[in-house]
Amino acid sequence: MSIGLVIAILLINLGITTWGVLQLRGLNEQLQQRDLPLAADSSGLQLALSNEETGLRGYLLTAQWTFLQPLLTGQVTYGQTISDLRTRSADIPAVAAALAQVESAVQHWIAGYEAPALAGVGKVPQSTVVADAVTGKQLFDSVRTSEQKLSDVITTTTNGDFSDALGARLRIMLGVIGASVVGVLFCVGLLLLTSRYILRPVAGLRQVARAMSEGEPASDIAPPKPPELREVYDSMLVSEATLRERQAALGRANDELVKASQMKSDFLATMSHELRTPLNAILGFTDLVRSGATGPVTPLMDDHLERVRRNGSILLDLINDVLDLSKIEAGRMTLTHDVVVTGTLVRRVMANVQALADAKGLRLAVTGDTEALALADPRGLHQILTNLIGNAVKFTAAGSVTCRIRADRDATFIDVTDTGPGIAADHRAEIFEPFRQVGEHATTGTGGTGLGLAISVRLARLMGGDITLMSEPGAGSRFTVRLPAVRPSQNGSDSSRAPLIMAIDDDLDSLSLWQAQVGRMGLQFVGVQQSAAAVDSAASLRPVAILLDIIFPEGDGWDILERLREDPRTADIPVHVVSVVDGEERARDATVKFMQKPVTEERLRQALAQYRQQPVEVAV
């Protein structure tokens, strides 16, 4: 409503201003089209009659034809000027009357002197011409008198019009200014009323929304008086109550999930012990019997015992894989971030599978930059390579398995390529899921537990890298492990590499999301899932900034922040606390910033923009 009134007032002011402009335009047109031309024509009339009289007198006294030119010019100009004056004075009686007197005097002069004098040129003596000139002067003096009267009347008329126009212009401008001032004052008053009855209540609603976002009770804020805004206020209180109920339900559900996760972990730990104990006896006594310590072993018995040992080993691997996956998902997998020589690890894994490759007639090869360095957990990377190279040898019937190592400025890549059966496009994403097998191995039982690739990709992401797959059915497969690169330099750091961001969070999904977002910003990323390894990892990696979650299943993010600040190696590293809880008042220095979850990629980009040009320091 207030906006409509403001617009109406602005339109009224615009109309008044437009009317004033049109009135001023009309006055200007009157002055330009009538009054100014009248004054000009009056002067032109005087000049024309003067030329005509002067030319006539000179011609009569000298009888020279050169004096006829001013006479003729004056006659033509007089006729045109008289016609213009008649038109312009049609609605001005005083000017028209004076003009009529001028025309009458001119006619008397022409009839009484000009016409007879011209007719008598060369026919009358010079003395007669001189005597007639006196009569002509008297008649022309009458013309001058009427002409001067016309000029005075025109001057009086135009001066009056100019005075009227000036007064009208002043009145119009005062009216426009007055209307504008009234309009402005009205708008200011309306805005003050709007501020009092609308903006302040709306500000109260913003306080309600802020209180809801900060988890404070919104009912403590006074409700607005306008009924429309009161309805909005009541709706927000209802939403707050609903939100609190849902948050409470989510809290209870989260507690149940935590308990369930703990129960699962306890169950797996217990089952690990309970399963490993009998498996240890089974495998131990099997080897003891096969060794002949208990008596002779026939070939058939040895074959049966080998089957027992092999299946027991498969069961033990399954138990280990399940426990590893459980640790990763629970955030209890402890990884280090050390500088490793990738070629050394690859050759070690190749040596472990060489016997199986020889038995199948496969050629194993390591190519590329075998001295390339990477930031990785040695045990975790060994497990990744064992899974990838072991699978390649296991599922390749003939041909070769090749590991190619390559490095660029920001990453080190290990390509594991085989000449096996390949993987269809619709199965490529499935093979990284737990307990999923694809192709004929899913039904023949030769595909293993289905956990190796699931564990490998999660380990790679925890190290700040990833695993990708390229494959075509019948053309083999290529698994690529990407890891953060290290390029040693003289002073132990490499300023040409992209700056490194380290994240400390127990949630693997959050780490994976941050890894993708930080990578899009042109920065390197390393995730640490275990709070116990946070400080040592930060000290060895020397990231330009740390993203820190506060809530951990074991320990507290504030404790991690305190340890980071107390350790001289990490005290100067900026920390961005990212969590659902608010604790900005707990910061001890300006290097600690806060972002509340959920954090958009744009918000993260703004927070990390300052580090994009800073080099990372890596202890090699």
Image (spheres, helix red, strand yellow):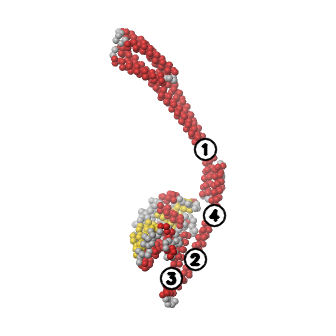
Residue type at numbered disc 3? Arg
Could you tell which of marks 2 and 3 lies nearer the N-terminus?
2
Residue placed most toward the observer, 255 or 73:
73
Residue type at numbered disc 1? Ser
Residue type at numbered disc 2? Met
Picture coordinates of residue 437 (x, y %)? 51, 72
Badge 3 crowding class, 10 Å Cα cut-off, few under 14, some 14 to 19, many 20 or more, is few
Could you tell which of marks 2 and 1 lies nearer the N-terminus?
1
Picture coordinates of residue 586 (x, y %)? 57, 61
Measure the C-alpha gap from mark 4 to mark 2.
32 Å
- Kind of element beneath mark 4: helix
Q: Is residue 464 visible?
A: yes
* Residue under label 1: 2
Measure the C-alpha gap from mark 4 to mark 1.
44 Å
Tag 4–tag 3 contact (CB < 8 Å): no
- Kind of element beneath mark 1: helix
Name which residue lies at 49% across and 83% down: 306
* Residue under label 4: 249
* Residue under label 3: 307
- Kind of element beneath mark 3: helix
Disc number for residue 271 = 2
Measure the C-alpha gap from mark 2 to mark 3.
24 Å
Q: Is residue 586 visible?
A: no
3 vs 1, front mark: 3
Measure the C-alpha gap from mark 3 to mark 1.
89 Å
Vertical side of 298 occupied by 24: above or below: above
Badge 1 crowding class, 10 Å Cα cut-off, few under 14, some 14 to 19, many 20 or more, is few
Vertical side of 138 occupied by 601: above or below: below
